[in-house]
Image (tube, coloured by chain):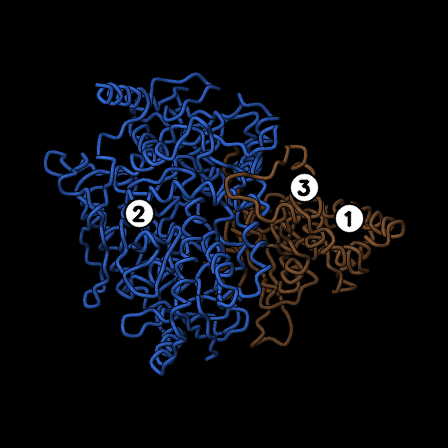
Chain colours: A blue, B brown
Amino acid sequence: MEKYQADVAIVGAGGTGLRAAIAVAQANPKLRVALISKVYPMRSHTVAAEGGAAGVVRDDDSYQKHFEDTVAGGDWLCEQDVVEYFVRHTTPELYQLEHWGCPWSRKPDGNVNVRRFGGMKVPRTWFAADKSGFHMLHTLFQTSVQFPSIHRFDEHFVLDLLEEDGVCRGVVCYDLQNGVFRQINAKCVFMATGGAGRAYAFNTDGGIVTGDGIALAYRHGVPIRDMEFVQYHPTGLLGCGLLMTEGCRGEGGVLYNKDHYRYLQDYGLGPETPVGQPKNKYMELGPRDRLSQAFWNESKKGRTFKYPLGEAVHLDLTHLGEKYLHERLPLICELAMTYSGVDPVKAPVPVRPVVHYTMGGIETNGRTETRMPGLYAGGECASVGIHGANRLGSNSLVETIVFGKMGGDAMAERAEKEKDFDSPELARQAEAAEKRALALFDVKGDESLSKVRDEMGDSMEAGVGIYREEEGMQKTIDTLKALKKRYVNIPLTDRGRIFNTEWMNLIELGYTLDVAQCMVHSAINRKESRGSHQRLDGPNGAYKERDDKNFLKHSLAIYNKETGLPDISLSEVKITTFQPAKRVYGAEADAAEAARKAKEAK
Amino acid sequence: MEQTANNKTMKITVLRYRPEQDDKPWEQTFDVPYHHETSVLEALFYIKDHFEPSLSFRWSCRMAVCGSCGMMVNGVPHLACKTFLRDYEGKDMKIEPLDNFPIERDLVVDLSDLIEKIERIKPYIIPAPKDRNMPLNKSYIQTPQQMAAYLQFAQCINCGCCYAACPQYKLNPDYIGPAALTLLYRYNIDNRDGGKKLRAPFLNEENGVWGCTFVGYCSEVCPKKVDPASAIQLGKKMSATDFVLKLIKPEE
């Protein structure tokens, strides 16, 4: 086993991991940063984010408005003190990226432009055409190469955390290219491994989005928070599930059902706004959970299109014209043409909801610290508390840099105080992890990796989809339990050590199964409807409503070593200034706002 | 939207190489069912799931933006996720690892040379002295026209297809090559940058822009229409101007 001594080990080199690495390097160039990623940094799934990143810049906008949009959008399950910090730090971080070379789209005067996005009162989404994540990721990667203290471990797959006396002391990983194991000791470990959309069959995610970091923290007893909140993005392409950004609707795209009716007006998002005149928080600019739920209801009513690849509604952009579409949404045009054979300039694009984002994750405080000293988390794998029960579009890209920076600063502080640590116990743990990984080669069973993976994905869609019921969730719980039993009988046909993707995929699947269990066990325990977690059951349908009395609380999934299942408990939500109210959009929101103002005036 | 056609089958030959077992690369052929939407990447998924779990290839996003799945399809560099079996109907297909890079395993090549070259050319904004302490409450002024000058050259996904296509890189692995030179030029012409001088050695050296003989195949195969050949030609112009300026004003 090769050993490397670092001050800070960062697992994952997407937006969050890279931003954290740069922060550590800038805070103190003497600190040794090990940046570990199972892919080259620019392959990380940040690259696929399209629409943009929220940051208050306009005169008619304010931190307070961004705060309110975020907390209400999250159906009040946000940590309000963390959201307060977040909204104040987005804009400086976005300017920082601009200074580093990110090509944010501009106004004619050369200043940064912003676009409309769902659930936001004021246009505040910074965008680099519809390749915002791509440009952010490449800017961060390219910026990072100037810091010699960042030692990259590209194509290194993390197998376990090292922990002694309850303190996180490093990681053990596997070098795919060279076929060797490495023990990396560190004073701080930062999880920045992204979400777990691959738990579902139909998702917008890359193949690498398998929940590795969430599962690793979970197996070490760290609470995983709010995992029942899985975001279905309303507009994915049929078949492949690739994303048609919310920016499409921000720029004025509209949704029709098969009767050429803008059905969103039937779901508390109206009245209908004229085509070509998008209005914030109305119709197509409602939040993602509401739009996905509306699709589900349209489908029940038989008002969706039926295509060979499935049911769909139409996302119509044709009125925006070729020039505007090619300037603002070039990737969308390319993707729709390539993967659906539709040119959005000429015809509407068939779309349907698709799993997109993991709102929950490793529980952290507002400083990205988990309950295990030395272990930090940021980005999609973490639950720092800004998304609540439903994330607003363009809050996650900016989350990566705000909390990447914060995590980097926090870790630099800790690393300066702590001494290097090594012990026989850490070596023992690293060797044990190596042995466990190698033992997978000895399995003699007749299971199939792809079958277990696919059955997991189908079962999650069926039981923990847009709408949920006890019976369906229980079925998924049972299925996952059975799949875990089958998992240990999956043999490896590939005996090699160099770039053995079958072996890596098998370990990833183990991670995803754990995360899937966190999701469904958290979901069945939440006997109410909130944000992306919508239930249809309960005595007299009681779980269809939000229940603040019992469930204005976070869910915690904590690994139980004996049962091998998560124990679910609840924890308090931090509410500072914004008391829970009914979550409203469209005309209802304007009425509520007017009533509030009138009350305040009295 | 196209209808999904009835399943057809294509004969697909894949180059295999397992460094711990094989003395040299060998070929393996599969009959892969496909429909109108099946990409080469999905054909590889099918092979891995149904016939040969040990086949290794890189992939992730499935939407031609992560740059993982560059490979040779019938001798031409392509992204597997953006290449469709329907366009090869009636033919056999041969999938090989990207040319001009050492094969690491099956369709996985060793990209470390490309990555090192990208890192080498200083691919980041080097602010001019006056901009070094720019506060975080304002941006540089960059008009849409100023952005348009470099934006196309900032679209590179580092997939390596252009290196696999480049005859100069094949002859001389020290040549900095299309993607890295394009990136160099992209930063040089960004009006926020003041680091042109520090990048000059890479631009001007014989393995820099002057290593290119303008075959243009890199631009032909680029899946993102970055047009590295054009960036390199513009880089030559920049390099020549620098040279002339140096003659006139040697102290610069």
**Which residue is identified by label 2?**
A385
Q: Locate residue A536 relative to residue A280 in the image: left or right.
A: left
Circle 1 Cα neighbour tier, 10 Å, few/some/many (<14 / 14–19 / ≥20): many
The type of residue carrying mark 2 is: Gly
The type of residue carrying mark 1 is Gly
Give the residue at x 50% y 32%.
Answer: A114
Q: Secondary structure at mark 2?
A: loop
- Along the line of sight, the residue nearer the viewer: A495 or A154: A154
Locate residue A105: give its quadrant.
top right
Q: Amino acid at mark 3?
A: Asn
| Residue in front for this viewpoint, A442 or A556 | A556
What is the C-alpha distance between the residues marked 1 and 3?
16 Å
Q: Which residue is mark 1?
A: B235
Say which of A184 and B30 sits in front. Answer: A184
Residue that appears at 63% across and 36% down: B142
Sequence-wise, the earlier of marks 1 and 3 is 3
Residue at mark 3 to residue at mark 2: CA–CA distance: 38 Å
Where is residue B115? Give x, y as percent: 62, 60
Mark 3 lies on residue: B191
